[in-house]
Structures are given as C-alpha cells and as structure tokens.
Image (cartoon, rainbow, N blue to C red):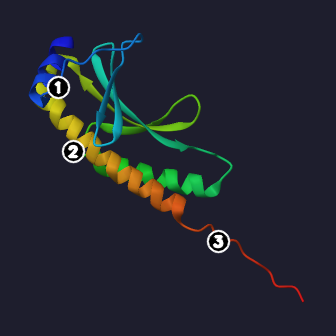
C-alpha cells in the first residue's frame, strides 16, 4: 500500500504521504478532507460529511432517504457508499481491493470521491439553508 501511495504522491507532484499513529493517511483535496486506511485486503477511502443523523427529526430522515437514492445512482459507476459511524455522523466511503488496485485507479477513485463530495455537500447545505416552515395558527 505504501508503494501505491508513494507512486500516487509522485504523480500528483506531492511529497510522500505519511500515516498517523493509527495508520490513517490524511489528504486535503479541493478543500475536502479525505482519509485513507488499510482494512484487511481493502483500502478504505472516507470523508466525514459534518452531518449527524437524528432519527427523531423527520427532515433528517427525508434527507437520508434522498441521499440513499443518490447512492443507488452512484453504484453504477463508483464504489462509494454512505455510512454512519458509531456517533450517527454521516461518512462518504469507498472500499477498494488492494490486490487489483493501481495508482491510476486510485487517482480516478479520488477524483470521483471529490465529485461526489461536492454533490452531497451541495445537497446538505441546500437542505440546511432552506427555511423550516412551521404552521402558524392565527388566534384573535
């Protein structure tokens, strides 16, 4: 995996990537945080989305349904999924088989990941900025 990441860094004109204490690699591309880690025979690419699921809020549930519909569309061309961590925070994630992975595929996946991040973040910001209408009952 380190050889693959070194090759990617040289293709991108960057210094070799260095992992943190947990073995995670932190990349910052187009103002997005991306994390790479090895999990078994897979390379996991993930990005936190700064959105937390609240099962008691109907608008959160509707937004989650909309996002999951997007995942179905992505599945035709991208290895990405949406996951919730143990704290109910939403994460965009891709799992890649290390045995068949090369620098070109990784670079293409990183590009797709950033494109999907832009789509998801636009949808999240659109939903968060839209007014939450409440019915007001006029009483004389």
In depth, the one of 116 and 34 nearer the eye is 34
Q: Is residue 58 left or right of residue 14?
A: right
Q: Earlier in the sequence, mark 3 or mark 2?
A: 2
What residue sits right under mark 3 in the picture?
Answer: 133
Q: Quadrant of residue 33?
A: top left
Residue at x 21%, y 41% (from the top left corner): 111
Q: Is residue 120 left or right of residue 135?
A: left
Graded by Cα atoms within 10 Å as few (under 14), some (14 to 19) or many (20 or more), the crowding at tag 1 reads: few
Q: Is residue 103 above or below residue 19?
A: below
Q: Is residue 74 above or below residue 33?
A: below
Can residue 98 be spotted in the picture?
A: yes
Q: Is residue 121 left or right of residue 43?
A: right
Q: CA distance from mark 1 to mark 3?
A: 48 Å
The label nearer to you, 1 versus 3, is: 1
Q: Earlier in the sequence, mark 2 or mark 1?
A: 1
How far across and down, in percent of the image, does residue 66 sit? 45, 56
Residue at x 19%, y 17% (from the top left corner): 16
The label nearer to you, 3 versus 2, is: 3
Graded by Cα atoms within 10 Å as few (under 14), some (14 to 19) or many (20 or more), the crowding at tag 3 reads: few
How far across and down, in percent of the image, does residue 40 sit? 33, 12
Graded by Cα atoms within 10 Å as few (under 14), some (14 to 19) or many (20 or more), the crowding at tag 2 reads: few
What residue sits right under mark 1 in the picture?
Answer: 14
Q: Which mark is residue 77?
A: 2
Q: Secondary structure at mark 2?
A: loop
Q: Secondary structure at mark 3?
A: loop
């Amino acid at each position: 995996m380190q050889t693959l990441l070194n090759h990617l860094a040289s293709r991108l004109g960057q210094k070799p990537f260095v992992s943190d204490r947990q073995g995670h690699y932190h990349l910052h591309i187009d103002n997005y945080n991306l994390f790479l880690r090895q999990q078994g025979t897979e390379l996991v690419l993930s990005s936190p989305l700064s959105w937390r699921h609240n099962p008691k809020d109907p608008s959160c549930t509707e937004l989650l349904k909309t996002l999951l519909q997007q995942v179905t569309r992505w599945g035709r061309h991208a290895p990405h999924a949406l996951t919730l961590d143990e704290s109910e925070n939403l994460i965009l994630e891709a799992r890649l088989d290390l045995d068949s992975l090369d620098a070109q595929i990784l670079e293409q996946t990183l590009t797709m990941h950033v494109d999907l991040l832009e789509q998801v973040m636009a949808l999240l910001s659109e939903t968060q900025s839209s007014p939450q209408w409440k019915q007001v009952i006029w009483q004389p």
